[in-house]
Image (cartoon, rainbow, N blue to C red):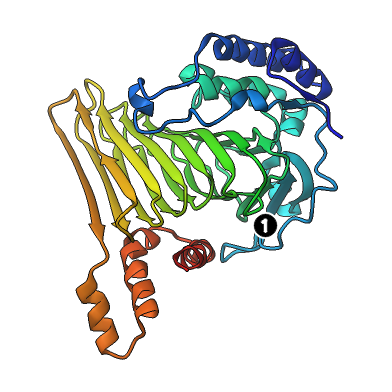
């Protein structure tokens, strides 16, 4: 049985020692611990948390697992890590509770100098490279209570590095299967100048677990000048999981980030998702799909920060709600002074499948330049009964007609996903939730 310690400074030191980490990582963890210890649990008095109340979440009931072992925690579902892209994955990494259970990296990718490994191996074997990027440029420990908690106690995750001028010969694919009740995985992707990669990142746990479970994660996507990253995050945690994530992508000159987010699971999700466009020609597209039911509460807080002129961002998030569930989307497009000739777009569309669910949709613009094109849109609507009646008049049973209308609602964002396997995985899950 893994040793479990309460969150404390001593636990930080013991965790780092158990992982045989270098001094710089221990120092980073301790700095994060000081921030965590100084901050209160977020409340609805804070604007970012005004619509998400976590008083029922008992953080003190969790702790730090020093000797966590992925073995003996049940078989990993066969669908995790299976093929989702047209080209066969050249790298596959499957973790159970942050511990590697399967790892493959093709000879071709290795010959290209692509680094694809678990985070702990990366810290030990590629320390200088990881140190340059780990929570220094994208996600930072001082972003909030849960960002600091992650910085202090992160465990497991994936590191992907693609060298300068390298187009990764095959897609990469990682998956986390969480059964321990507490996971703190970290995803760090770095594409050097003029490189290119496709990466699928999955997160899942048993559909119904006992008691509260916690996932406190971070995702950092660093896209260098002229680089091109296609990244898909597919989350399907069980109904007992409380997820607190900080996710950020930075895009350099003429770089491209195509970022796909699917949120199907958890009891509660609070995710901060930010695109930073740092130099002229930077482009970021954020495509999100969520479906809530039962007691689910999903709060997605997105930022599109235009930090330079001649940059482009495009966000489309679509969600469906049923069974009295709740969603919150709050988005912001920011243009700094001097960020002229930018093009920023954001839209959130919500489909209510009953009378008791609730969706809050709050777009925002903060523009400090005078030559820009920034637009936003937000809608909350119900199933169109005339569309359903039309389909039924053509002999289609009502359940099938309803599914077809819902499929049509999600189709515009599905068309932005360049992988048929990912589209199929997401829509099959939507069909399950429709019931």
Residue under label 1, please give it.
Answer: 81
Depth check: give the residue in front, 93 or 208.
Answer: 208
Residue at left offset 72%, top offset 45%: 179
Q: Is residue 220 visible?
A: no
- In this rendering, the answer to whether 63 lies above or below 297 is above
Residue at left offset 62%, top offset 13%: 33
Q: Residue furthest left?
A: 370
Image quarter in which the N terminus is found: top right
The percent coordinates of residue 277 (x first, y second) are 36, 32
Q: Is residue 74 visible?
A: yes
Depth check: give the residue in front, 167 or 124.
Answer: 124
Q: Residue furthest bottom?
A: 395
Q: Is residue 40 left or right of residue 375?
A: right
Depth check: give the residue in front, 98 or 344.
Answer: 98
The percent coordinates of residue 392 (x first, y second) are 29, 85
Q: Tag 1: Cα neighbours inside 10 Å, few (<14), some, or many (≥20)?
A: many
Depth check: give the residue in front, 249 or 302.
Answer: 302
The percent coordinates of residue 55 (x first, y second) are 48, 27
Q: Is residue 299 left or right of residue 27?
A: left
Query: Tag count in the figure?
Result: 1
- In this rendering, the answer to whether 198 lies above or below 409 is above
Residue at left offset 71%, top offset 48%: 93
When asked about the image quadrant of residue 36, the answer is top right
Q: Secondary structure at mark 1?
A: loop
The percent coordinates of residue 143 (x first, y second) are 47, 20
- In this rendering, the answer to whether 106 lies above or below 82 is above
Q: Is residue 1 left or right of residue 415?
A: right
Residue at left offset 67%, top offset 28%: 62
């Amino acid at each position: 049985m893994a040793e479990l310690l309460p969150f404390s400074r001593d636990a930080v030191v013991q965790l780092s020692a158990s992982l045989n980490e270098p001094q710089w990582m221990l120092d980073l963890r301790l700095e994060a611990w000081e921030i965590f210890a100084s901050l209160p649990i977020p409340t609805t008095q804070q604007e970012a948390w005004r619509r998400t109340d976590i008083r029922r979440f008992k953080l003190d009931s969790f702790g730090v697992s020093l000797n966590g072992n992925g073995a003996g925690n049940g078989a990993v579902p066969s669908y995790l890590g299976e093929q989702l892209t047209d080209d066969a994955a050249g790298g596959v990494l499957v973790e159970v509770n942050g511990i590697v259970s399967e790892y493959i990296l093709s000879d071709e990718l290795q010959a290209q100098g692509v680094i694809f490994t678990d985070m702990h191996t990366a810290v030990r074997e590629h320390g200088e490279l990881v140190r340059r990027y780990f929570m220094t440029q994208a996600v930072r420990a001082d972003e909030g209570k849960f960002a600091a908690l992650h910085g202090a106690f992160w465990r497991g995750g994936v590191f992907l590095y693609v060298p300068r001028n390298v187009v990764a010969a095959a897609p990469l694919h990682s998956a986390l299967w969480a059964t321990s009740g507490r996971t703190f995985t970290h995803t760090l992707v770095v594409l050097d100048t003029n490189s290119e990669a496709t990466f699928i990142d999955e997160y899942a746990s048993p559909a119904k677990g006992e008691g509260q479970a916690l996932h406190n994660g971070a995702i950092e996507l660093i896209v260098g000048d002229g680089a091109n990253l296609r990244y898909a995050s597919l989350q399907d945690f069980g109904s007992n999981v409380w997820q607190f994530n900080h996710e950020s992508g930075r895009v350099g000159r003429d770089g491209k980030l195509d970022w796909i987010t699917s949120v199907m699971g958890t009891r509660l999700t609070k995710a901060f998702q930010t695109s930073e466009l740092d130099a002229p020609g930077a482009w970021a597209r954020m495509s999100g799909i969520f479906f809530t039911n039962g007691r689910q509460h999903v709060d997605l807080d997105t930022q599109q920060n235009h930090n330079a002129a001649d940059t482009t961002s495009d966000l489309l998030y679509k969600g469906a709600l049923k069974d009295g569930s709740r969603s919150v989307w709050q988005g912001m497009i920011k243009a700094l002074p001097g960020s002229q000739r930018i093009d920023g777009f954001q839209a959130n569309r919500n489909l209510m499948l009953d009378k008791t669910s609730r969706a809050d949709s709050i777009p925002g613009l903060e523009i400090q330049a005078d030559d820009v094109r920034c637009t936003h849109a937000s809608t909350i609507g119900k199933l169109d009964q005339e569309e359903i009646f039309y389909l039924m008049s053509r002999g289609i049973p009502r359940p099938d007609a309803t599914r077809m209308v819902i499929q049509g609602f999600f189709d515009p964002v599905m068309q932005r996903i360049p992988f048929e396997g990912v589209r199929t995985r997401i829509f099959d899950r939507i069909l399950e939730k429709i019931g």
